[in-house]
Image (cartoon, grey):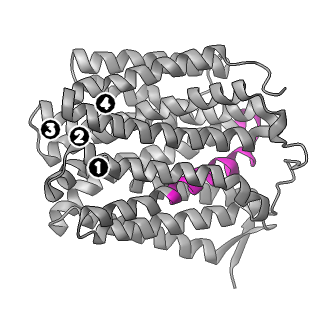
Amino acid sequence: MPAKIKQSIWALVFAFASLFTLGLADNIRGTLFPEILNQFQISNTLGSWLFATSSGAAFVAGITSTTYLRRYTISSLLFTGVLLLTVGLAIMGFSINFNWLIAGSMFLGLGIGYMGVSQNLLVAESAEGKDRSKALSGLHGMYGLASFIAPLLAATTTKAYGNWSGAFYVVAVVGVLFLITQLLITPHPKFTVHSPKVNPDEVNKKRVSKKALTMVSFFFGFYVVAEILISSRLALYMRTYYEMDLVQSAQYVTLFFLFLLVGRVSFAFIHLPFSLKSQLNGFLIGTLVFLVMGLKLHPFFLALSGLTMAPYYPLCVSYISEISGDLSRTFLSVAMSFQSLAVVAMHLGVGYMTDHYGLAFAFGVGILALVISIVCLSFHPQKLTV
């Protein structure tokens, strides 16, 4: 018989544990990307579909998650997401050609999309005010921890297994363990189809300002473009311009995620005496400065940008929840869907630019994305409904 724990505690524990699993799955790919390109003898443009396919699938998951939640619970959405992610990892590890890898990436992306929505809603709806910001920072601290471990895991398992696929198998096992645990431990009371905190009759998409929804999606999604650009291409950047091997380039990626981890864990305990909007703008500007310095002065600043990026995502989720109120499910679901779509465009664009103009030029996409985020965050409408 399954064990039962308080619903609010269940939400935090399983959101945290699932984001750790997601972080491992999402971030072993960047470190192993050069190895995959070499094994299948493909260009950066074609190889970028490894990331673009998963982001496209995550977009589909994001836009369908709202419909899913009208009929099923958040906990079942989380289970479905982890199951799809695990299947995707297993297929990617088994891949005998690039087409198999793309198929696995599609399942992986669907899992990431469903998990992303369910994790953030579980925490955002289980905490309020300052507690919500701290809980979300702690949640995404788990992503930072997993991201820090992922490059080391990718490098060590590749050396031990003799092939990059070993890392995908290991993380797939983590996913299986999570699924078994979720079956054995259930929330009390069980989640209902609609949370008591959200009145579905009030969540009417016709009330939402399209301008507000667009600008909120932009300052959320384009930040993610910049973060994923650095995390997925930093290893390739170091190997291209500094002639590093797998282990050395993985160390730089690890350093980036170490700063990401330190920043997110710190902000789970630190409360700055500024508005969320001011904090978010400050972190965007700091990241922009470090990115430019990393490209012009020394790549260490590319890794250091993880420190200023760290608080943005969890604080941004908290900010969107705060300003959108009962419409938070709509705004978060659409923002996460746009994030995935923007990342698809980024991966394809960066792959093309890398082949034709060089990876350093392609990193300019990150600069543009941060500028767009700053503008949209600064000038989005204060009233989100019409």
Q: CA distance from mark 1 to mark 4?
A: 13 Å
| Element under disc 4 | helix
Look at 29% across and 72% down and name the residue there: 94
Of mark 1 and mark 2, the one earlier in the sequence is 1
Of mark 2 and mark 4, the one earlier in the sequence is 2
Q: Do residues under tags 3 and 2 come within 8 Å of each other at their CB atoms? A: yes
Callout 3: 10 Å neighbours few (<14), some, many (20+)?
Answer: some
Tell me which segment is drawn in magenta.
Answer: 110-131
Mark 2 sits on what residue?
235
| Element under disc 3 | helix
Of mark 1 and mark 4, the one earlier in the sequence is 1
Q: Amino acid at mark 3?
A: Arg
Mark 4 sits on what residue?
303
Q: CA distance from mark 3 to mark 1?
A: 14 Å
Of mark 3 and mark 4, the one earlier in the sequence is 3
Look at 27% across and 21% down and name the residue there: 294
What secondary structure is the stretch in magenta mostly built from?
Answer: helix
Q: CA distance from mark 2 to mark 4?
A: 11 Å
Q: Indicate left or right for 225 with 94 as reference.
A: right
